[in-house]
Amino acid sequence: MPQVLKAANGLSQMHPLETSITPDAIVERARALVPILQEREAQAITNRQVPAETIAAFQEAGFFKILQPKRYGGYEMSPAVYCEVAKTLAEGCMGSAWVYGVVAVHNWQLALFDPQAAEDVWGQDQSVLISSSYMPTGQARKVDGGYRFSGRWAFSSGSAHCSWVILGANMVAEGGDGKAEPYNFLLPRSDYTIVDTWNVMGLCPTGSNDIVVDDVFVPEHRVLRERDMFNLDCPGHALNSEALYAIPFAQLFNRTVSTTSIGSLRRALNVFVETTRKKRTTYTGLSVASDPTIQKAVADVKLILSDLELRLAADLAELEARAVSGDWPIERRAELGHSTTAMVSRCVEAIDKLMLFSGGKAIYSGNVVQRAFLDIHCARAHVANNPYPYARNVGGLAFGFDNDCMDL
């Protein structure tokens, strides 16, 4: 276990044992795991869970530390490294990559809570993992020192491998406008139950089961107002003042659920090209690869992938630059939000082309293109991958209407 020291402020500090790790080395570790993830994918789909061995491999490789604060053993690396690892792992198994991305981003968000929350989670063990379900379906009642909290939430990816969870609820803020607004509540494993509901057509390994909470106490320091994340005015910002934590929450989290589709699409394209190269039509014996329609489909998908890669890199670079400068005009935040939420729709367009021209063999279980087709379509079902509200907001701002989206 890493050596834990106590700082003057009473919070844990970690003496880093791995000081020489570089972003390139982290990505290389992800690349080395791709064939292993491919081997494990079928069993992960059957079990509807990422194998414990895979989570252990992610831990050993340091993937969950990429965005974690250094004071708790993390690397505080660029979001670009985090996204590159997610894309790369998705070339092995998109479901496993999805769990990595969602769980790892919570190690970044925990820096936004009151520092005592991070002490609660990582004070004794800096490898502890957190799952989430932000849908505001909880019920919270203010009591002395915190809240009584209950509810049921769906879609908590990777929850079986996590010891804490972040859950959503709407409340009326003290000193607010009187309207209910979303808050996040952080709970330990002893305070909730995981209910096995995850029987789905795609993203099967994510184990995104339901969470049930029955009237537990959540202390004030483990509650975070989403408006504070939008305004970049969180309790944790005083301690975690690095630029990495000065990025609006949604600008990073929404990339968590869009980036893996790019890696899955790339894998599907590579497999499609390789298998089509060897195919001949049943009736004529002609090379399938010589069909201009199929050649154009490949060119279209390659162009979509290139566009998405360039857009993602540019957006991430801009997020880092704005985090340093503190310049976050709402119009640009809306455009950046729309940029990421539109990515999976582009991936759907591309994977549909590959599925269309994959032939009858693609309907059999285990086909890589079919698997990507199902996974990417399931990713598109995530609320943060629905581009229409974000696009409408961008258009509205252009015409002089007020911003009405807090998920930016």
Image (cartoon, rainbow, N blue to C red):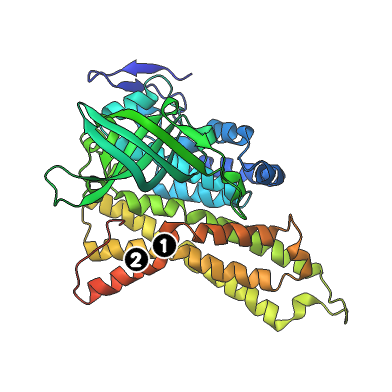
Q: Amino acid at mark 2?
A: Tyr
* Mark 1: secondary structure: helix
Residue 266 placement, left or right of 222: right
Q: Amino acid at mark 1?
A: Thr
> Badges 2 and 1: C-beta atoms under 8 Å apart?
yes
Residue that badge 1 annotates? 341
Q: Is residue 286 above or below residue 207?
A: below
- Which is more toward the observer, 69 or 196? 196
- Residue 77 at what x, y percent from top left? 40, 41
- Residue 158 at what x, y percent from top left? 52, 40
- Which is more toward the observer, 112 or 389? 389
Q: How far apart are labels 2 and 1 at the CA level?
A: 8 Å
- Residue 175 at what x, y percent from top left? 11, 44
Mark 2 surroundings: few (<14), some (14-19) or many (≥20) residues within 10 A: many
- Give whichever of discs 2 and 1 has the lower sequence position: 1
- Residue 27 at what x, y percent from top left? 53, 44
Q: Residue at x 53, y 54 (%)?
A: 260
Residue that badge 2 annotates? 390
- Which is more toward the observer, 21 or 191? 191
Q: Is residue 164 above or below residue 33?
A: above
